[in-house]
């Protein structure tokens, strides 16, 4: 069979640019258009399958590349945990470009010790009297209110002491004794504060004092004499350059026994108050020295 002029021709493919559709003479048989349409549809389906398959392969290839990049960026090769795609350390901003402000080291002076001011006559220079140590007309300790009686001040320490205490005060160079009496509900107490030049002297006087020595009870200003005879309760203590003593008993002359808790409480309250007042004296002088 011949296909037009010029010799044999290749079969026509509508998808190949170089292929040519065979044209027959009008005198020849009519082409089978239905067969040609079926062949074209078959080729189109095959080509679409190829295009879809190729797209899947491309998608898988791109996805694999991304996964590999993620694994590489988050792997364990970098010991510090820093991603490997960060710029080199030389290009990172340095903290030294904006240093934190620095301040010269400072330290507050240690607080002054109140005991240093009440431990020596050289530093303990504040005014001292029975009224400065025991101000006011009454004293409140907890819920108990004691009325204040007479006060006294003498440089003859031995003259206001009884028993073995006069010799103890003289031996340790006592310079002064301040006394005050408080009373409540038939019980009275006299506090005697012996003043020395040093803490060592006051401490020694406290150690050498015994139960046979005590400060003489101070009466007057509405307080009847007490503890001139019979049994009374006494205490001894010291703080700084001060030794302080209490003598407590009944205003009616009754002997004190161990069951008389009111007497013991009165003596303890006044001993505690005396300690606080001496300490306050040291605190006031320490505060004034710090501010000055």
Image: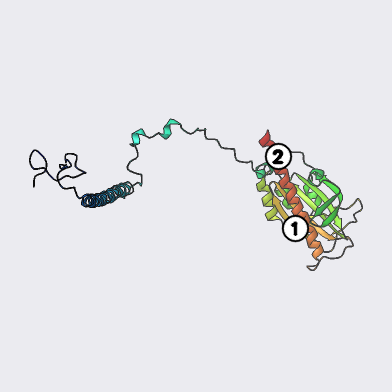
Q: How many marks?
A: 2
Can residue 7 be seen from the camera position used here? yes
Q: Which residue lies at the image location 76% right of the left edge and 49% below the top edge? A: 193
Asked where in the image residue 144 lies, by quadrant, the reply is bottom right
Question: Which residue is at the front of the view, 161 or 272?
Answer: 272
Question: Which residue is at the front of the view, 55 or 159?
Answer: 55
User: Gap in Å between the C-alphas at discs 2 and 1?
Assistant: 28 Å
State which mark lies toward you, 2 or 1: 2
Tell whether 218 sits left or right of 84: right
Position in image of residue 204 (x %, y %): 67, 51
Q: Is residue 187 above or below residue 150?
A: below
In this view, which residue lies farthest toward the top? 97
| Label 1 CA crowd tier, 10 Å (few <14, some 14–19, many 20+) | many
Judged from the image, the secondary structure of the residue bearing numbered disc 2 is: helix
In this view, which residue lies farthest toward the bottom? 259
* Tag of residue 285: 2
Question: Which residue is at the front of the view, 223 or 291?
Answer: 291
* Tag of residue 235: 1
Asked where in the image residue 232 lies, by quadrant, the reply is bottom right
Q: Which residue lies at the image location 43% right of the left edge and 31% below the top edge? A: 97
The disc, 2 or 1, on the residue closer to the chain's N-terminal end is 1
Position in image of residue 33 (x %, y %): 22, 49
| Label 2 CA crowd tier, 10 Å (few <14, some 14–19, many 20+) | many
Can residue 195 be seen from the camera position used here? no
């Amino acid at each position: 069979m011949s296909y037009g002029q010029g010799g044999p021709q290749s079969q026509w493919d509508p998808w190949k640019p170089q292929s040519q559709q065979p044209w027959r003479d009008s005198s020849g048989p009519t082409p089978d258009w239905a067969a040609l349409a079926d062949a074209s549809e078959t080729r189109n389906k095959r080509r679409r399958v190829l295009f879809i398959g190729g797209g899947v392969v491309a998608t898988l290839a791109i996805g694999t590349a991304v996964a590999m990049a993620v694994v590489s960026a988050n792997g364990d090769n970098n010991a510090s945990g820093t991603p490997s795609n960060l710029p080199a350390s030389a290009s990172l901003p340095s903290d030294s470009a904006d240093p934190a402000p620095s301040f010269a080291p400072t330290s507050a002076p240690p607080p002054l010790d109140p005991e240093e001011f009440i431990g020596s006559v050289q530093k303990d220079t504040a005014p001292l009297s029975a009224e400065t140590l025991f101000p006011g007309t009454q004293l409140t300790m907890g819920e108990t209110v004691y009325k204040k009686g007479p006060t006294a001040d003498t440089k003859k320490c031995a003259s206001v002491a009884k028993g073995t205490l006069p010799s103890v005060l003289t031996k340790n160079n006592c310079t002064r004794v301040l006394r005050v009496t408080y009373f409540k509900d038939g019980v009275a107490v006299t506090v005697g504060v012996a003043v020395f030049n040093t803490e060592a002297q006051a401490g020694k006087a406290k150690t050498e004092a015994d139960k046979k020595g005590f400060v003489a009870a101070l009466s007057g200003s509405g307080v009847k004499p007490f503890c001139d005879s019979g049994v009374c309760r006494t205490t001894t203590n010291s703080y700084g350059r001060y030794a302080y003593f209490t003598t407590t008993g009944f205003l009616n002359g009754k002997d004190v026994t161990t069951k008389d808790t009111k007497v013991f409480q009165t003596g303890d309250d006044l001993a505690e108050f005396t300690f606080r007042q001496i300490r306050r004296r040291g605190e006031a002088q320490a505060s004034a020295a710090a501010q000055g």
